[in-house]
């Protein structure tokens, strides 16, 4: 699917600009018109960290006319292994300022806007409204969901990326033309389930691989060339050295961009949204949680069980536990799932990481399936302990 250019071309390029961008200008697909579009473009990079560093450097070099950078953090020595926009002498300096200085050194012909502040529900709409496109280089789920929600509510496209150890992912979320982040990840993982780069580490150069994909997609969207990564999730494995892309469909039931959205404004508290497991669910799982290894041995022994995957169809298509039947969580909430469950088998629920299946377990137990269990850690734990060849997302 190709899309029309996101921005109109600027009136002209100066002599200096023609000289600087000549290697772009002689590419037929970019040419004068494409470079003028870049000149007119306003791009915001959220975060001047691992992904933001290469992204900002290349967006600046490419001649994106207005480049915003928002970050509240200061440069730490442990950042320098991957955040190549900052240098030794920047340690202790606000990242937004340090990044802006590097950008100005690379390309004095563009405007840099420094937002040396935390992106919050108070300022995100106003800041995003000033830009055509957002590049998301955030490293935490609360900010990611907020970036997604704000972008969808404003009708803006954004290029998302994530990195962990040797694995990276990227996609373009633009609700007008495809899925949003919530279509792919309807719910955040439970706190502590998915380690951050600070906890689990990241190969420094991985940031360049994913950050450059994000810039590549940004340039394509701004100039209207190529096939943007809308509706596709790019999965990069640096150890195997392969890229795979999987289709991601818009979820018609998405609470934000679906047919009957229930999220029509920003949430009040994204931290709380990303940290919540209900008391009912906590009670349901105590004594009724099995490990992926136990599930595998039950399957191998031919136990009389019925394995139900409560994730969304998108997620099921990417990876699933063999033999699991898909019944999305929404069907448990509205009660229609219960009649699909056999009475004469032990019900085993799982989701991605164990939060949604915990909630469903509470419903199933209340409905009389008292010996039902769920798989702690979900399909992620299955992949980790039973079949590491399967893709994670
Ligand atoms: Zn959506």
Image (cartoon, rainbow, N blue to C red):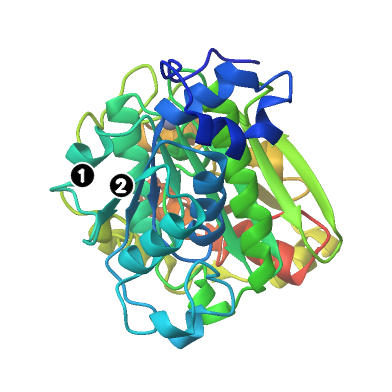
Q: Secondary structure at mark 2?
A: helix
Q: What residue is pinned by disc 2?
A: 146
Residue 309 spot, x, y in % from top left? 60, 45
* Residue at left offset 42%, top offset 34%: 330
Q: What residue is pinned by disc 1?
A: 267
Q: Are marks 1 and 2 in contact (CB under 8 Å)?
A: yes
Number of labels in the image equals: 2
Few, some or many C-alpha atoms within 10 Å of disc 2 (few <14, some 14-19, many ≥20)? many
Q: Visible in this render: residue 341?
A: no
Nearer to me, 58 or 171: 58
Residue 120 spot, x, y in % from top left? 20, 53
Residue at the farthest top position: 4
Q: Secondary structure at mark 1?
A: loop
Nearer to me, 147 or 108: 108
Q: Quadrant of residue 316?
A: top right
* Residue at left offset 30%, top offset 61%: 276
Is residue 101 found left or right of 266 in the rendered image? right
């Amino acid at each position: 699917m190709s899309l029309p250019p996101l921005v109109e071309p600027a009136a002209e390029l100066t002599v200096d600009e023609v000289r600087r961008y000549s290697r772009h200008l002689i590419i037929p697909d970019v040419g004068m018109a494409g470079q003028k579009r870049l000149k007119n473009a306003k791009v915001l990079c959220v975060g001047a960290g691992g992904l933001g560093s290469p992204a900002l450097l290349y967006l600046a070099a490419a001649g994106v006319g207005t480049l915003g950078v928002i970050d509240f953090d200061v440069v730490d020595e442990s950042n320098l292994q991957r955040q190549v926009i900052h240098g030794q002498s920047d340690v202790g300096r606000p990242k937004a300022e340090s990044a802006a200085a590097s950008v100005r050194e690379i390309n004095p012909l563009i405007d840099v806007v420094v937002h040396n502040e935390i992106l919050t529900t108070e300022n995100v709409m106003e800041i995003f409204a000033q830009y055509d496109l957002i590049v998301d280089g955030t490293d935490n789920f609360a900010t990611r969901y907020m970036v997604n929600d704000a972008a969808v509510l404003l009708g803006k496209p954004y290029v998302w990326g994530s990195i962990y150890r040797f694995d990276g992912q990227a996609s373009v979320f633009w609700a007008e033309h495809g899925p949003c982040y919530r279509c792919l990840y309807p719910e955040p993982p439970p706190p502590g389930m998915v380690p951050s780069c600070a906890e689990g580490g990241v190969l420094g150069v991985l940031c360049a691989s994913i950050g450059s994909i994000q810039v590549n997609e940004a340039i394509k969207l701004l100039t209207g060339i190529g096939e943007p990564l809308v509706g596709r999730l790019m999965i990069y494995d640096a150890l195997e050295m392969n890229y795979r892309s999987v289709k991601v469909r818009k979820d018609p039931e998405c609470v934000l961009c679906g047919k009957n959205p229930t999220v029509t404004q920003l949430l009040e508290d994204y931290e709380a949204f990303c940290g919540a497991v209900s008391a009912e669910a906590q009670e349901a799982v105590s004594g009724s949680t099995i490990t992926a290894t136990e599930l595998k041995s039950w399957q191998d022994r031919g136990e009389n069980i019925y394995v139900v995957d409560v994730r969304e169809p998108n997620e099921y298509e990417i990876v699933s536990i063999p033999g699991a039947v898909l019944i999305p969580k929404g069907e448990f909430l509205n009660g229609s799932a219960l009649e699909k469950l056999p009475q004469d088998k032990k019900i085993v629920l799982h989701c991605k990481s164990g939060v949604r299946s915990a909630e469903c377990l509470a419903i199933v137990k209340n409905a009389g399936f008292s010996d039902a269990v769920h798989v702690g850690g979900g399909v992620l734990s299955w992949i980790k302990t039973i079949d590491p060849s399967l893709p994670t997302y």
